[in-house]
Amino acid sequence: QVQLVESGGGLVQAGGSLRLSCAASGRSFSNYGMGWFRQAPGKERELVAAITWSGEYKYYVDSVKGRFGISRDNVKNTVYLQMNSLKPEDTAVYYCAADGTASRMWVPTQARWFAHWGQGTQVTVTS
């Protein structure tokens, strides 16, 4: 049973920073790509950032490029999302997700490829 537990969300003013963490357990974390999704009220879930199992390749949605950074520590079984220069439009529940396919050679970018999800952590950015 794969478990993903997010932490690090909170309330921050526009221009501020937060670092989300996602601790994984239950299988060999280092063999699977990871992603961060978000969903704001009334909006569809979107992939914010993703990273291959090796950490070599990364994906970012255009709206966060240059502001967010995804990374992973395969020793600590944790994936991070560093969020800088936050904007009110970044307000959402952020979810960590794990690819269902081991050792995928490219960055997982389709929601249907992610087999395991965390419970989410709220990020609220005030203007």
Image (cartoon, grey):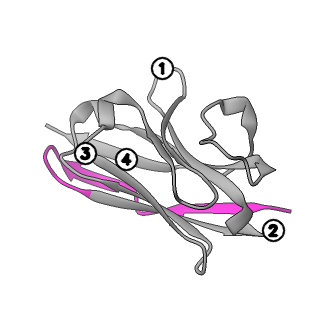
- Locate residue 45, reporting x and y percent: 54, 28
Label 2 sits on what residue type? Arg
User: Which residue: 31% across, 29% down?
Assistant: 63
Q: Earlier in the sequence, mark 4 or mark 1?
A: 1
Callout 3: helix, strand or loop?
Answer: loop
Q: Quadrant of residue 102?
A: bottom right
Determine which residue is flagged by label 2: 27
Quadrant, the N terminus: bottom right
Label 3 sits on what residue type? Arg
| CA distance separating discs 2 and 4 | 28 Å
Q: Nearer the viewer, residue 112 or 119?
A: 112
Q: Nearer the viewer, residue 38 or 125?
A: 38
Q: Is residue 31 above or below residue 42?
A: below
Q: Which residues are magenta?
A: 1-17
**Viewer-nearest of discs 1 and 2:** 2
Determine which residue is flagged by label 1: 43
| CA distance separating discs 4 and 1 | 15 Å
Label 4 sits on what residue type? Val
Callout 2: helix, strand or loop?
Answer: loop
| CA distance separating discs 1 and 2 | 32 Å
Determine which residue is flagged by label 3: 67
Label 1 sits on what residue type? Lys
Q: Earlier in the sequence, mark 1 or mark 2?
A: 2
User: Which residue: 68% across, 67% down?
Assistant: 30
Q: Is residue 36 magenta?
A: no
